[in-house]
Image: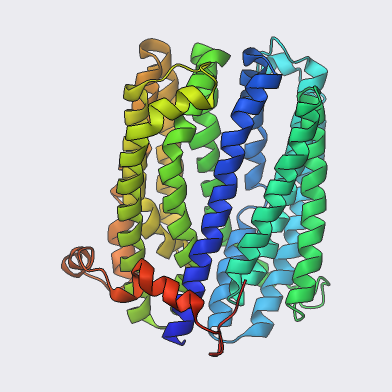
Amino acid sequence: MDSAARQKRMALGFLSNWVSRLAGTVIQLIQVPVFLHFWSLPLYGEWIAINAIPAYLSFSNIGFGTVAGNEMTMLMGRDDRAGALRVFQSCWWLILLVCALTMVAFGVALFTVPVSLWNRFNVLSDSDARWILFALGMAVLFGQLEQLLGSVYTCVGRYPYGTFVKSILSLCAFAAMMVPVVLGRGPRAAADVFAAANIVGTVVLGLMTRKDVPWIEFGWRHACWPEIRRLTRPAFAFMAFPIGNALNLQGTVLAVSYALGPVAVVIFATARTISRVALQMVQLVNQTFWPELGAAFGAGNIALVRSLHRRACQMAVIIALGLIAVMMTIGPWFLVHWTSHKVPPSRELLLLLVVSVLFYAGWSTSSTLLTAINRHQTLAAYYLFGTGVTVVVTYFAARYSGLHAAAASLILSELIMNTYVLPASLKVAHDTWGGFVAAMFRYPRSLRPAELWRRLRETPGQPGEMEI
């Protein structure tokens, strides 16, 4: 693998992932003042709470989308195109089948179980709550197919372009959802438009994938059950990550909602959104290094794996510390103006939330190595345990000690993860604690901003290089 081509691809990947994270941040920054302007505070609080429920459908592909993407990337690292196509077709049809069955089961349960058994809404009617959940569930399930389609670009080294396209599609879906909100329509109309936009986006991405990567086929000639069985164990383990993410994000929101009500949810969720800007940037680093780690490991280049792991961790820590300082400086002021003075600022609440982000940076980037090569079974168990315990602690902390205690409880899951991840990653990379720590204080010239910019301006022409 050519070093210059790889560095340019990673620089483009970083920029495209930055655009993706920026798109997510823009969505968060815009939607809060828009919703608060056109909807009442209790209605927006119930919208936040009801959005948390469909997120649990994200485990419906049992992790086959991400695991298939990792496997395809490692196979292409060995130039095994036939193997990558076999994995793609096998997992495509499996995900499609599982998502269809999940949607049917979800719909039956949704329209037969009384809403009062799983939540209490004062503004939304039972009928609207059911239809909103059904529409948002459709959007989540189609996202599982998008994940596998995006993996096609990743395995051929075109992940910057694939990430950029998915960002544009996400912005389009969000913009479409805002139209009925601005026109004075309620949550049901917003959810319906959002679901329709996501379905259209999935179809568009599928057509683009077929055109850009001609050897990818949507038939079943190369699909086989032995391939699915081989990926079953890591796929089931990967199911813990979307569940854990839902517990960490939506689960804690629901815990605060049950303990303190919808108004407290708005205060907690908006402050957490501000704190998660740093977390989003750490995830940007993770997504940039993920495909390169998989390809290097697939090619058997352990020295490159070790170097990439060190640089990823180094960049994540630097970015996290810098952004946390910025958040604590301007965060409270921004929170007041962002919400049009409807949400009170709390420096103490924000400090507790950014501390949890700092602990998150300590383990999440290192864990990218384990997930990129499908060696994440133990990692998944730790994550599910940590986030599950945190949701329970958050509820009781919020109920008996208020929002500050709820924010402090989020640190628990990050501490649990730190006890396992780094030692496991160092073992895979054949690294030592001494070498790893020393590398954290060495910053190579090739990764300095000026050098990265110079490489981006070079005329492409070396094998393996590409443009967005």
Residue 268 visible in the shown view: no
Q: Quadrant of the C terminus?
A: bottom right
Relative to 275, is 75 above or below? Answer: below
At horizontal 63% and vertical 61% (from top left) the residue drawn is 164
Question: In the rendering, at what x and y percent does residue 18 appear?
Answer: 51, 56
What is the tally of numbered marks visible in this picture? 0
Query: Which of the 4 image quadrants contains residue 439?
Result: bottom left
Its colouring scheme is: rainbow
At horizontal 66% and vertical 25% (from top left) the residue drawn is 35
At horizontal 30% and vertical 67% (from top left) the residue drawn is 310
Relative to 24, is 424 above or below? Answer: below
Question: In the rendering, at what x and y percent does residue 44 appear?
Answer: 65, 20
In the image, is 190 to the left or to the right of 452?
Answer: right
In the image, is 131 to the left or to the right of 83?
Answer: right
Question: In the rendering, at what x and y percent does residue 433 appear?
Answer: 19, 64
Question: In the rendering, at what x and y percent does residue 132 appear?
Answer: 77, 28
Residue 449 visible in the shown view: yes
